[in-house]
Image: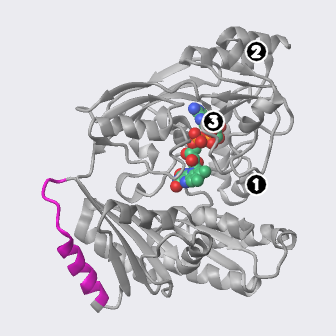
């Protein structure tokens, strides 16, 4: 046993330093099983002070560390490289909810808390933590903050950055910064909290956070609406925004091709609308006020939009189970796509008003260059972020298709940047998109990012090879 690992055992206890390859496997392999990295050990501290001790040891012995929460990230950010030099620092044992203040509408949770557990604690206090991700049963608060997670309610509540009031962080040199404030305003200098949010573990280890809570909705309505074009979906979004203002919590756009994949691979799921329309919007309204509008006013709005030719067909959920079923159509798209074969994914964002023009132009360019490729588009039209995934044309073997990856990525990202968008809406950069980031981000922005990294992590031990 190396002196470094001996010191780690002393710091956190023998049982919390794992070195057996078999045992470490789940921590070393990414969620989509694209990479199994190597590590000296998986170390799982149980307190902020233990995290600080391990980080100080990493500095002393020049050992890189890869912070990890639920390991559900999609860009190879939470797994080590193949060198075997690093340790994985698992935050899973730090899973206490330290405080919940219903009057201040805040919850203070440790980084390893699973998101669903924080939802449950908030619900018990009649409050909502409006961060809804399909991975909420496994992902953690520290991971959510480190990738600035989004989800399906961003148009109403913003990303987790907007929900975060304070952080506790172990710096890259092993000091504890207690920034766990519950203030809604603080202009006392640089915003350190915002530096660590979205940093993907490259600047420090988040050990706890204060998150803002909202009232639980009293009533919710889920709708699936068929439209002919993304322009029509955008017009409908504007109408709902104007009519429902703060009650509109979700507005997702789903192409027919995406729904058709779900129909093929989940044949027992009842389809709420015929599959003959080009686009579908999954909409959710959440009412917190005591006097919730009844569905008649909703039906009247839909009828007016039908008469204008914006809406082609629509169904409004009549029960929680019907609403759940509609959501399953949205949530099963990724799994259906995986079952359909390899695809090349893009997690992009475009200014909301430009989404239809972006889709028209990019679809045309792709079809011209890669005829009959399958474009599976779905995403959060309400905030402009899209999953724009490309599947192989019929009869093209996977190896040939994947050989097109660099060209497809360049075509898509060139188009994204022509429309003033971004190559990562919510999943981050990890080690998967570092080259792409270097190509599209401005040199000045990259230079500032490198200077921040060098200032906060002078020995370069924090998640090396990620982002930059
Ligand atoms: C089925 C599925 C659906 C998803 N849907 C969405 C979605 O709708 N919206 C969305 O935004 N994302 C989505 N994601 C991806 C999303 O990134 C993660 O689910 C989640 O936010 C990551 O949390 P985690 O605890 O698993 O982090 P991990 O995967 O463990 O880590 C993610 C990154 O954060 C770093 N990190 C983790 N914990 C800490 C810490 N305490 N301190 C410092 N750095 C840390 C890691 O080093 C890594 O770089 C989805 C993922 C899956 C599998």
Q: Mark yes or no: residue 282 visible.
A: yes
* Residue linked to disc 1: 435
* Name of the residue lying farthest toward the left: 291
According to the image, label 3 marks what residue? 201
Question: Quick one: 253 or 165, which is closer to the camera?
Answer: 253
Report the disc number at residue 222: none
Q: Secondary structure at mark 2?
A: helix
Q: Check residue 294 for magenta coloring.
A: yes
The residues bearing labels 3 and 1 have C-alpha atoms spaced at a distance of 18 Å
Residue 286, horizontal then vertical, whole percent? 28, 58
Q: Quadrant of the N terminus?
A: top right
- Residue in the image at 44% along x and 63% along y: 327
Q: Residues within 10 Å of mark 1 (few under 14, many from 20)?
A: few
- Against 278, residue 466 (above or below) is above
Q: Main secondary structure of the magenta part?
A: helix
Sequence-wise first label, 1 or 2: 2
Q: Which residues are the magenta region?
A: 289-306
Residue 287 visible here = no
Residue at the image point whose x is 43% and y is 80% from the top: 273
Q: Quadrant of the C terminus?
A: top right
Q: Is residue 371 left or right of residue 420?
A: right
Q: Nearer the viewer, residue 151 or 323?
A: 323
Labels 3 and 2 touching (C-beta < 8 A): no
- The location of residue 83, given as percent across then percent down, is 87, 35
The residues tagged by marks 3 and 2 sit, at their Cα atoms, a distance apart of 19 Å
Judging from the image, what secondary structure is the residue with disc 3 in?
loop
C-alpha distance separating marks 1 and 2: 30 Å
Q: Secondary structure at mark 1?
A: helix
Q: Which mark is residue 60?
A: 2
């Amino acid at each position: 046993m190396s002196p470094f690992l001996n010191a780690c055992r002393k710091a956190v206890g023998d049982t919390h330093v794992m070195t057996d390859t078999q045992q470490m496997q789940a921590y070393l392999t990414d969620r989509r099983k694209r990479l199994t990295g190597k590590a000296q050990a998986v170390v799982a501290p149980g307190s902020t002070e233990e995290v600080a001790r391990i980080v100080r040891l990493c500095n002393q012995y020049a050992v890189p560390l890869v912070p990890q929460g639920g390991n559900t990230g999609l860009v190879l950010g939470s797994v080590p490289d193949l060198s075997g030099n690093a340790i994985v620092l698992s935050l899973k044992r730090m899973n206490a909810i330290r405080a919940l203040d219903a009057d201040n509408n805040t919850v203070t949770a440790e980084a390893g808390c699973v998101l669903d557990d924080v939802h449950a604690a908030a619900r018990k206090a009649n409050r909502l933590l409006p961060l809804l991700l399909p991975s909420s049963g496994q992902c953690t608060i520290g991971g959510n903050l480190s990738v600035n997670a989004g989800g399906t309610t961003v148009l109403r509540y913003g990303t987790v950055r907007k929900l975060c009031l304070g952080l506790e962080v172990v710096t890259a040199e092993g000091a504890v910064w207690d920034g766990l404030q519950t203030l809604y305003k603080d202009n006392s200098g640089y915003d350190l909290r915002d530096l660590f949010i979205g940093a993907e573990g490259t600047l420090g280890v988040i050990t706890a956070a204060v998150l803002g809570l909202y009232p639980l909705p009293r009533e919710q309505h889920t709708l699936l609406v068929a439209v002919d074009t993304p322009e029509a979906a955008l017009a409908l979004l504007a109408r709902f925004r104007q009519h429902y203002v703060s009650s509109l919590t979700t507005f997702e756009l789903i192409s027919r091709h995406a729904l058709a994949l779900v129909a093929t691979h989940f044949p027992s799921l009842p389809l709420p609308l015929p599959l003959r329309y080009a686009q579908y919007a999954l909409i959710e309204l959440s009412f917190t006020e005591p006097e919730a509008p009844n569905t008649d006013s909703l039906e009247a709005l839909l009828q007016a939009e039908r008469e204008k030719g914006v809406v082609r067909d629509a169904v409004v959920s009549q029960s929680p189970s019907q609403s759940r079923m509609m959501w399953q159509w949205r949530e099963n798209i990724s799994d259906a796509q995986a079952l359909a074969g390899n695809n090349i994914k893009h997690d992009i964002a475009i200014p909301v008003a430009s989404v239809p023009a972006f889709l028209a132009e990019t679809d045309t360019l792709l079809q011209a260059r890669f005829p009959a490729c399958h474009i599976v588009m779905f995403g959060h039209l309400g905030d402009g972020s899209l999953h724009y995934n490309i599947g192989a044309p019929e009869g093209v073997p996977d190896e040939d298709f994947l050989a097109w990856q660099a060209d497809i990525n360049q075509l898509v990202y060139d188009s994204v940047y022509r429309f003033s968008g971004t190559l990562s809406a919510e999943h981050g950069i990890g080690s998967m998109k570092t080259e792409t980031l270097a190509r599209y981000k401005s040199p000045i922005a990259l230079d500032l990012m490198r200077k921040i990294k060098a200032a906060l992590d002078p020995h370069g031990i924090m998640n090396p090879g990620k982002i930059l």
